[in-house]
Image (tube, rainbow, N blue to C red):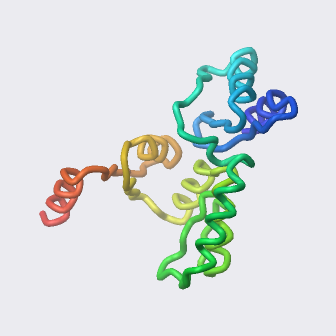
């Protein structure tokens, strides 16, 4: 993560280029102005990165360029009542468990522009005794990362109606 942050800082050259996701296993995503991210890819290659590439995404997620979206998120969350969860929520921007509603709101807003500390979040949960993880949504990327971060963990991706049916059938046996 330290190397990626240094690469991003070198690539910025007056633009935004920041470490956006620390996914674990040496996989760090940078985000920012397109030209700066392109420079970061080239700099990472010269510094020995095994793989450096541009990801096809619709926006520069988890960096300062998303501040307008963070402002909208803060405004929207200001209109809803967030209650204390029954179980703690592990914030992926804080890499720790939180339960206080105001802290949950702050963390949700912060993750729009902040670095996602996935590796640390999964390690936190595994250290707290979590051994089974479920990835809800399209894809299986997080499940693969979890298995690499947390020794002995199992992770199931549930992204389609068929996955839900298979999951429900497996729980009824």
Taking depth in this image into account, of 36 and 41 the one nearest to the observer is 36
Residue at position x 54%, y 75% in the image: 88
Up/down of 171 relative to 47, above or below: below
Up/down of 6 relative to 41, above or below: below
Residue at position x 67%, y 38% in the image: 31
Provide residue 72's location: percent of width, then percent of height. Answer: 64, 64
Provide residue 147's location: percent of width, then percent of height. Answer: 44, 44
Provide residue 53's location: percent of width, then percent of height. Answer: 59, 23
Q: Where is the C terminus found, in terms of image quarters?
A: bottom left
Up/down of 160 relative to 35, above or below: below
Number of on-image labels: 0
Residue at position x 68%, y 70% in the image: 106
Residue at position x 42%, y 58% in the image: 131
Taking depth in this image into account, of 9 and 95 the one nearest to the observer is 9
Taking depth in this image into account, of 85 and 64 the one nearest to the observer is 64
Q: Where is the N terminus found, in terms of image quarters?
A: top right
- In which image quadrant can residue 4 be found? top right
């Amino acid at each position: 993560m330290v190397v990626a942050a240094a690469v991003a800082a070198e690539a910025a050259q007056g633009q935004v280029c920041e470490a956006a996701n620390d996914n674990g296993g040496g996989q760090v995503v940078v985000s920012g102005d397109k030209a700066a991210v392109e420079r970061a890819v080239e700099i990472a290659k010269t510094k020995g990165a095994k793989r450096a590439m541009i990801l096809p995404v619709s926006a520069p997620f988890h960096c300062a360029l998303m501040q307008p979206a963070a402002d909208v998120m803060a405004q929207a969350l200001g209109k809803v009542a967030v209650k204390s969860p029954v179980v703690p929520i592990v914030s992926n921007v804080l890499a720790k468990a939180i339960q206080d509603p105001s802290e949950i709101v702050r963390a949700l807003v912060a993750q729009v522009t902040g670095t996602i500390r996935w590796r640390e979040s999964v390690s936190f949960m595994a250290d707290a005794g979590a051994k089974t993880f479920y990835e809800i949504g399209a894809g299986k990327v997080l499940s693969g990362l979890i298995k690499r971060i947390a020794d002995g963990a199992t992770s199931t991706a549930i992204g389609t109606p068929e996955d839900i049916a298979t999951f429900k059938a497996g729980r009824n046996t």
